[in-house]
Image (spheres, helix red, strand yellow):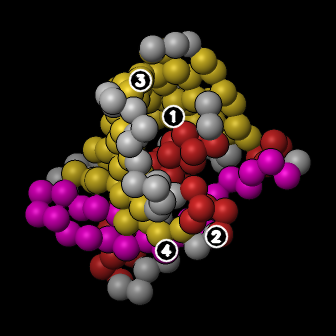
Amino acid sequence: MTVRLFLIALLTLFCSAGASSQDTSAVLLEQIKAVNLPEKSLKAAWHRVQHSSLLVEDLVSEGWVYLEQPDKIRWETTSPVQQVSILSSDESARGRFRIPTEKDFKITVLDGGQNYTLRLDPLRRDLRQMLGQVSISVDRRSLKILYVLIVSPEGDWQRIEFSKVEKDL
């Protein structure tokens, strides 16, 4: 499990709100946060498609993500291989990787008709080296996250869709 996958889960579910120069965008971000973020915990299934220019076929994997406020993540891969990784602020404090917050991104709301797109531009140098572009697609009616698309600086990408979301178990 790479740090990038933890970052995806974190961005998708914890980083839906941030500063905005427009009042309507700030209100929308707060509404998206209210719909998607748990007060205490969250469990969701995920399905990921990864594309790399080095591979002939895209890689497909599935699993579960468990989040516990404020900063604990369990990323469980169930297919094609089984693997479990855990990240918490305790690990990041030892200098491995600081868990990003909304302050580490410039968040722009784009209106795409049926969906909103939250574009997250990393402000930290270490995040810019890892992430070229992060887009979160949000359903216009329900304000639920549909998927996250992450494009690396090299042009490789991964798309993660979440389902079976349960909050505050």
Image coords of residue 80 (percent x, y) = 45, 14
Residue 103 higher or lower than 93, as above or below: below
| Quarter that holds the N terminus | top right
Q: In this orientation, which residue lies closer to the viewer: 3 or 36?
A: 3
Q: Could you say whether the residue bearing mark 1 is in a helix, strand or loop?
A: strand
Looking at the rendered structure, the kind of residue marked 3 is Ser
Calculate the distance from the C-alpha at mark 3 to the C-alpha at mark 2: 29 Å
Calculate the distance from the C-alpha at mark 3 to the C-alpha at mark 1: 20 Å
Residue neighbourhood size for the residue with mark 4, other residues' Cα within 10 Å, grouped as few (<14), some (14–19), many (≥20): some
Q: Mark 1 points at which residue?
A: 42
Q: Are marks 3 and 1 in contact (CB under 8 Å)?
A: no
Task: Judge left or right: residue 13 versus residue 162.
Answer: right
In this picture, which residue range is highlighted in magenta? 95-118
Q: Name the residue under label 4.
A: 106
Calculate the distance from the C-alpha at mark 2 to the C-alpha at mark 1: 27 Å
Q: Which mark lies nearer to you, 2 or 4?
A: 2
The residue sitting at 64% across, 42% down in the picture is 3
The residue sitting at 36% across, 58% down in the picture is 135
Q: Name the residue under label 3.
A: 61
113 within the magenta span = yes
Q: Which mark lies nearer to you, 1 or 4?
A: 4
Calculate the distance from the C-alpha at mark 2 to the C-alpha at mark 4: 10 Å
Q: Can residue 105 be seen in this view?
A: yes
Calculate the distance from the C-alpha at mark 1 to the C-alpha at mark 4: 25 Å
Q: Mark 4 vs mark 3: which is more N-terminal?
A: 3
Q: Mark 3 vs mark 1: which is more N-terminal?
A: 1
Task: Judge left or right: residue 91 versus residue 167.
Answer: right
